[in-house]
């Protein structure tokens, strides 16, 4: 997956901060990358989870094919609310 340039990354993160589920779906459907430039501090998934956009977080997690164990490891390190994060993990495990 190709890495986004800085302007593309900023646009993707803006969409995620706004909870723009359908716009992110269009982003993915257009074949655009979710890979951020090195050194980017925020992630689309982290923003979605921290802001309670669970449908957006599920879309991002499923598209990136991130295993639940990796999400848990990241969640412990970078997400403010462990309770929200645990609820999210429970909701996407099938």
Image (spheres, rainbow, N blue to C red):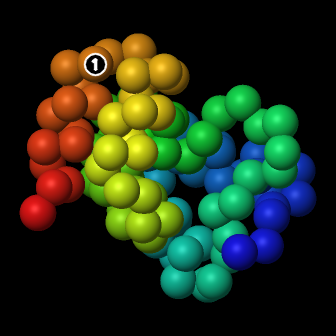
Judging by the rendered image, the residue that carries numbered circle 1 is 82
In the displayed structure image, the side of residue 69 where residue 5 appears, left or right: right
Instruction: From the top left corner, tell me how far across and down residue 35 is, in percent.
Output: 70, 60
Q: Residue at x 83, y 50 (%)?
A: 37
Q: Quadrant of residue 61?
A: bottom left
In the displayed structure image, the side of residue 61 where residue 3 appears, left or right: right
Q: Residue furthest top?
A: 80
Q: Residue at x 28, y 19 (%)?
A: 82
Instruction: From the top left corner, tell me how far across and down residue 90 is, in percent.
Output: 13, 43
Identify the element where label 1 is drawn: helix
In the displayed structure image, the side of residue 53 where residue 41 appears, left or right: right
Asked if residue 21 shows in the view, the reply is no
Q: Residue at x 79, y 73 (%)?
A: 2
Instruction: From the top left corner, tell me how far across and down residue 24 is, in percent.
Output: 51, 64
Q: Residue at x 41, y 33 (%)?
A: 73
Q: Is residue 44 above or below residue 49?
A: below
Q: Quadrant of the N terminus?
A: bottom right
The residue lying toward the viewer, choosing from 63 and 9, is 63
Q: Is residue 10 above or below residue 5?
A: above
């Amino acid at each position: 997956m190709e890495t986004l340039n800085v302007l593309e990354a900023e646009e993707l993160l803006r969409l995620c901060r706004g909870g723009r589920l359908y716009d992110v779906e269009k982003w993915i459907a257009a074949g655009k990358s979710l890979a951020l430039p090195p050194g980017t501090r925020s992630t689309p998934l982290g923003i979605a989870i921290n802001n309670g956009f669970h449908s957006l977080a599920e879309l991002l997690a499923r598209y990136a094919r991130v295993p639940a164990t990796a999400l848990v490891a990241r969640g412990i390190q970078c997400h403010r609310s462990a309770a929200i994060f645990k609820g999210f993990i429970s909701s996407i495990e099938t």
